[in-house]
Amino acid sequence: MKKSKSPIANPFTKNILSEFANNPYSSFNYKQLAKRMGVKDPGGKAQIISLLADLAKQKILIESKTGKFKISPKHITTYGKGKSYTTGHVDMMSTGKAYVINSEGGDDIFISPNNTKDALNGDKVKVFIFPKRRDRKLEGQITEVLERAKTKFVGTIQISKGFGFVIPDDPKVPVDFFIPKDKLNGAKDGQKVVTELDLWPEHAKNPFGKIVQVLGDPGNHGVEIQSIVLDYNFDLTFPDFIEKAAAEIPNEVTALEIAKRRDFRDVFTITIDPFDAKDFDDAISLRKIKDNLWEVGIHIADVSHYVTEGSIIDTEAYERATSIYLVDRVIPMLPEHLSNLVCSLRPNEEKLTFSAVFEMDNEATIHAEWFGRTVINSNHRFTYEEVQTIIEGGDGPHKDEILVFHDLSSKLRKERFRKGSINFESTEVKFKLDEKSNPIGVYIKEQKEANWLVEDFMLLANKKVAEFIGKPNGGRKVKPFVYRVHDEPSPEKLNTFAQFVSKLGYEMNISSRQNIVKSYNSLFKAVAGKGEKNMIETIAIRTMAKAIYSTENNGHYGLSFPFYTHFTSPIRRYPDLMVHRLLALYLNGGSGTNVGDLEEKCKHSSDMERSAIEAERASVKYMQAVYMLDKVGQKFDGQISGVSKWGIYVELIGSKVEGMVRMKDMADDFYFLDEDNYQVMGQKFGKKYKLGDKVKIQVKNIDVQKKQIDYLLV
């Protein structure tokens, strides 16, 4: 196809359009554009502002957000270089095919199994994009692995004469690792091991590896949990020298340090946490100033006082970036001496905190705010259940203060939803464990008013800290900062989701942000208690952009906050520790820090957060499989939670344990997938099994290692 002739003659304008066309999925404001083009003089910047407005009038550019522009799709080829290469990260399927998530935004690129080269799941790769065919998805070929996501993999070894193969636990790694005899490292046939990628010779079907750790026999609880942790690049324990350094930090608070801080020790203060929590990183305080005016303090453990930037403990915390909450244990970001003792806001102990303090009236309208370092002494440690009992009319200590907190938080929440916050809810499966960490029961953790009470005040602190630093105020220069950002969803994904739910009988109006929010909140109410609830909520979340950490503030779409950060959990999240340090720096008159370094730390923290979430999900799936082991042959009521060409997914009512009824086990007919209507249908008799239908199943088989559960229809 011939490239259309450019109607723009001015070279400066052509250069501007070239920047947009060669980054077709990115939006730029005039400052970003000037920086990319090397324009520093005020006259040149003024010209860019004028040209952007003019090009938007001509509809060559689209104003995607106020002051930010991107090129109209029909003008990309006119002004671009027609790039056929891009970079991105691999999302590998168990079948060997993959999608590359484009680093420049836009559609994912499909990669067939014979075009993945030597790429593995999560790798950063270079992709050649094939010319797009009408009505076909974007396809490409991986030409180079730029950066490995990881080089160590957990799996089971099978040993033959003179060599072995490691079959990875992760289904997203669809190749086995060839292990030469001299690199078996004492591993025995059938054991769980960690293999390190050694090399992948040109034209070789399998990568070559070496055994770097023997974990033990599969099926052993400790081995399986360790396998999950190591497979997601985390460590179960801290090195001895880190534990030793932490142990030397004293728990006592000195009078000299107290003198430097605002003193809240005599102000009513409480913590509210799960019954089994050990690290209390947030507390709330209440003081009546006068009629219709309250002082509410949100007090966060001052980890930055104890963990100094660049120290060995800080380096270790940064590498981990987050605590991981597995079914039977917590793998903390900080050694337990810090997370459970020194920094934990335990009752009746003097503790150092970093606080956001607000004066608010009975309607939760804020009249004043203050941020700074403080000292507290918590009056009481509440569990969520104890606070919920008081909210529901029962008795308990400090009842009057709890009800004031509840009233104020309810009004904050109501205002948040009025301004467009989306009420995303997710179901959390919890297990009752015996003394050996074996699951003896399953229950669903419900979010109630007590949970929302804490969340509302934490959201307030996060929002207000971000505004304090990031909001231009009287010409004040905005300083580098760490934001928690959640971009708006792509129109394509929203449209697909609206079509999906319409086939299930639900309506979505996606004509404006206001209608989108209203539709989401109505949808979540409508699906409560129904079989399709989990699937709809999961797909709804996937429709949204992923929340990440960034130095560039794009606001938080889901919460409808123009400014948002994470300030409230520095014991378990490294970005919160970064935020504390930056806030302290700016409160003391500091000028800023290197944005590039901050952005790198943001990216690392976002990546590790995703790995932690995946590890937590894997531990739940493993524990569900263990829980169902002694129930083979038993019958249960369930609901169809998903359909695929392999079979139907059924979630048990009550325990939420999901398994699959495979098509090959549905022997009364030949069933096929009716993808458009989210059902499978019998070819001969026309029997249908649709998403949300109630069914009775029998447990057929459990594979603990693969975390797979098979059911039969009764």
Image: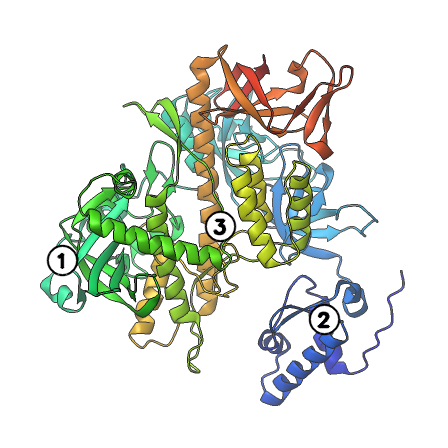
In the displayed structure, does residue 30 sit left or right of residue 341? Answer: right
Instruction: Give SS at disc 2.
Output: strand
Residue displayed at 41% across by 68% down: 467
Task: Assess whether mark 3 and mark 2 are in contact (beta carbons under 8 angstroms).
Answer: no
Q: Mark 2 or 3 closer to N-term?
A: 2
Does residue 306 appear in the picture of this structure? Answer: yes
Q: As rendered, which of 429 and 294 lies closer to the eye? A: 294
Q: Mark 1 or 3 closer to N-term?
A: 1
- The three-letter code of the residue at mark 1 reads Val
Does residue 212 appear in the picture of this structure? Answer: no
Q: Position of residue 269 (x, y in %)?
A: 20, 54
Residue displayed at 43% across by 13% down: 630
- The three-letter code of the residue at mark 3 reads Asp
Residue 61: image tag? 2
Instruction: Give SS at disc 1.
Output: loop
Q: Residue furthest right?
A: 2
Of labels 1 and 3, the one closer to you: 1
Q: Is residue 181 above or below residue 386?
A: above
Q: Mark 2 or 1 closer to N-term?
A: 2
Q: Position of residue 652 (x, y in %)?
A: 50, 23
The residue that disc 3 covers is: 607
Dot 2 alpha-carbon crowd within 10 angstroms: few under 14, some 14 to 19, many 20 or more: many
Q: Is residue 35 above or below residue 452?
A: below
In the displayed structure, does residue 582 sit left or right of residue 425? Answer: left
- The three-letter code of the residue at mark 2 reads Leu
The residue that disc 1 covers is: 253
